[in-house]
Image (cartoon, helix red, strand yellow):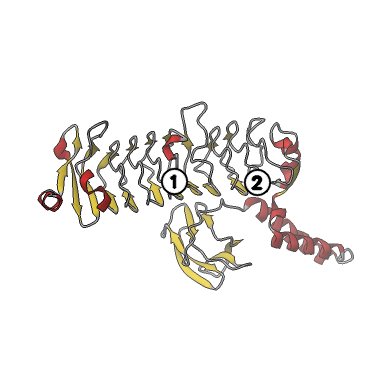
C-alpha cells in the first residue's frame, strides 16, 4: 500500500488560493516546490500530501517564484537536513519546520520579512543561522520561533525586530558567536541576547544607533565589548546588566570620556582605547612610542616616527569588522565572490598568529587583521577590480564589483 501510493503520486498541487499555481514534486529524497505565489497552509487535521513519506525527505528546495512557506508544511520531517529557500519567499508561516530534528543550518534570504510562531521549534540540532544582508527588516516571534533549538552561531546581515514587549531572547540562550554587519544592522531590539552566557565577545558596528532594554542582560561571561561608534549609542540602564567587572569595553580613544559619562555605558568599569584589544598592534604602537622617545635630538627622524605613529592610530580607529560565523570544518569558504559589500570567510582552521590580508594588484596591502577562525571584510569602500586574499600561507583571488 505504501509503495503503491508513493509511486502513483509524487506530484501535488498545493497553491493558494489556486491549487494549480504551486506544485510539489517528490523524487528520491528531495521535495521540490515550484510555481508562482503562496503555498497553502495546513492546520488542525489538515496535513500536507507528502506527510506519509515525511521521514524519507532529506532535502527541500523552495524555488524562486514561491512567496510563502505554508504553515506546518514540513512538520515532523525528522530526516530533513538541507533546505534551500528561494529569493521570492517573504513569509515562513507558523510551524513550517516544526520538529525537523536533523536540520543543523538554515539561511534566511533577504526577501523573508516574517517568521511565524513555532516555525523552527524543536529543531534540536539547529546551530547555524544566517540572516542574509539587505534593507528588509526581519520580524519574528521570539523566543517561540526557535524554541527548543541549539542556535549557537548567528550571522545578522540586517535588522531583526519583534513586536512583543516581553519577547525574550531572539534565538534562545545558546548563542556563542554573533556577527552584526556594519551598515546593515542599525538597531538591536530589547531582550535580543538576554541570558546568552556563552557569549564572550561582541562587536557593535558603528551603524548601530539603538540597543534595547536588557539586550545583553545576564551575558555574564562577556569579557570583551567592542564599539566602533565615536558617539555612544543610546542604551538602557539594564542593557548590559549582569556583565561582570572583568569585562572590558573598547571604544575609539577620543570617545573614552564620553562613554564613561554616558548612561549605561558608564556602568562598565573597564573602558580602554580600541587599539589596545589587538596585542600585535599594541606592541607595535608601544615600540614606536619608545623609539620616538630616543630620537629627541633628531628632528627629521622624530617627525617621521610621529607620522607613522599617528597613521597607525588612525588606521586602528577606522578599522574593524564584526566576527563572521564559525562552522567547524577543515576547509575555507569565501563568499560571495565576486562581492559588492562584505566578504565572509568561514570554516577556517586557523593557526595562532595567522593574518588575514588583502592586496591590490599593485601589491599594496589594503586590509589586514589577525585571523581568529572567522572574518568578515567590509568591501563597500574598495574600488572595483581584482584583489589577492592571503590567509596564513593560503591565497585566493577576490573580485570587487
Q: Label for residue 360?
A: none
Indicate which disc, 1 or 2, sits on the residue closer to the N terminus.
Answer: 1
Q: Neighbour class for label 2 at 10 Å: few (<14), some, many (≥20)?
A: many
Q: Neighbour class for label 1 at 10 Å: few (<14), some, many (≥20)?
A: many
State the residue in front, 197 or 245.
197
Picture coordinates of residue 157 (x, y %)? 47, 46
Picture coordinates of residue 221 (x, y %)? 65, 46
Q: Residue furthest top?
A: 165
Q: Is residue 273 above or below residue 333?
A: above
Q: Quadrant of residue 231?
A: top right
Q: Residue furthest right?
A: 297
Picture coordinates of residue 372 (x, y %)? 59, 60
Residue 33 located left or right of residue 349: left
Residue placed under numbered mark 2 in the picture: 222
Q: Residue at x 45, y 44 (%)?
A: 149
State the residue in front, 221 or 133.
221
Q: Residue at x 48, y 56 (%)?
A: 343
Q: CA distance from mark 1 to mark 2?
A: 26 Å
Q: Label for residue 133?
A: 1
Q: Is residue 161 above or below residue 109?
A: above
Amino acid at each position: 500500500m505504501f509503495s503503491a501510493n508513493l509511486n502513483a503520486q509524487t506530484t501535488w498541487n498545493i497553491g493558494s488560493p489556486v491549487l494549480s499555481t504551486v506544485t510539489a514534486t517528490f523524487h528520491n529524497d528531495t521535495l521540490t516546490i515550484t510555481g508562482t505565489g503562496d503555498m497553502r497552509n495546513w492546520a488542525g487535521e489538515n496535513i500536507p500530501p507528502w506527510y506519509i513519506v515525511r521521514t524519507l525527505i532529506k532535502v527541500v528546495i523552495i524555488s524562486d517564484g514561491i512567496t510563502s512557506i505554508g504553515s506546518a508544511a514540513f512538520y515532523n520531517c525528522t530526516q530533513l537536513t538541507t533546505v534551500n529557500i528561494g529569493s521570492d519567499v517573504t513569509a515562513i508561516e507558523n510551524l513550517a519546520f516544526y520538529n525537523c530534528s536533523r536540520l543543523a543550518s538554515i539561511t534566511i534570504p533577504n526577501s523573508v520579512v516574517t517568521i511565524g510562531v513555532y516555525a523552527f521549534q524543536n529543531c534540536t540540532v539547529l546551530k547555524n543561522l544566517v540572516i542574509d544582508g539587505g534593507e528588509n527588516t526581519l520580524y519574528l516571534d521570539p523566543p517561540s520561533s526557535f524554541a527548543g533549538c541549539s542556535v549557537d552561531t548567528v550571522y545578522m546581515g540586517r535588522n531583526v525586530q519583534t513586536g512583543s514587549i516581553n519577547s525574550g531572547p531572539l534565538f534562545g540562550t545558546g548563542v556563542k558567536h554573533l556577527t552584526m554587519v556594519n551598515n546593515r544592522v542599525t538597531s538591536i531590539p530589547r531582550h535580543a541576547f538576554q541570558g546568552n552566557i556563552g557569549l564572550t565577545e561582541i562587536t557593535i558596528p558603528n551603524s548601530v544607533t539603538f540597543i534595547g532594554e536588557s539586550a545583553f542582560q545576564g551575558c555574564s561571561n562577556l569579557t570583551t565589548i567592542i564599539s566602533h561608534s565615536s558617539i555612544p549609542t543610546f542604551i538602557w540602564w539594564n542593557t548590559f546588566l549582569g556583565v561582570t567587572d572583568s569585562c572590558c569595553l573598547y571604544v575609539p580613544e577620543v570617545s573614552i570620556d564620553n562613554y564613561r559619562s554616558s548612561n549605561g555605558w558608564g556602568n562598565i568599569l573597564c573602558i580602554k582605547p580600541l587599539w589596545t584589544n589587538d596585542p600585535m598592534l599594541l606592541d607595535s604602537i608601544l615600540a614606536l612610542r619608545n623609539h620616538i622617545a630616543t630620537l629627541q635630538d633628531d628632528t627629521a627622524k622624530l617627525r617621521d616616527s610621529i607620522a607613522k605613529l599617528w597613521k597607525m592610530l588612525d588606521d586602528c580607529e577606522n578599522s574593524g569588522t564584526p566576527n563572521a560565523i564559525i562552522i567547524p570544518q577543515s576547509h575555507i569558504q569565501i563568499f560571495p565572490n565576486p562581492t559588492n559589500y562584505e566578504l565572509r570567510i568561514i570554516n577556517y582552521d586557523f593557526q595562532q598568529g595567522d593574518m588575514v590580508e588583502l592586496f591590490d594588484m599593485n601589491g599594496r596591502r589594503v586590509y589586514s587583521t589577525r585571523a581568529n577562525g572567522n572574518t568578515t571584510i567590509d568591501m563597500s569602500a574598495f574600488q572595483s577590480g581584482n584583489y589577492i586574499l592571503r590567509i596564513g600561507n593560503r591565497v585566493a583571488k577576490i573580485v570587487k564589483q
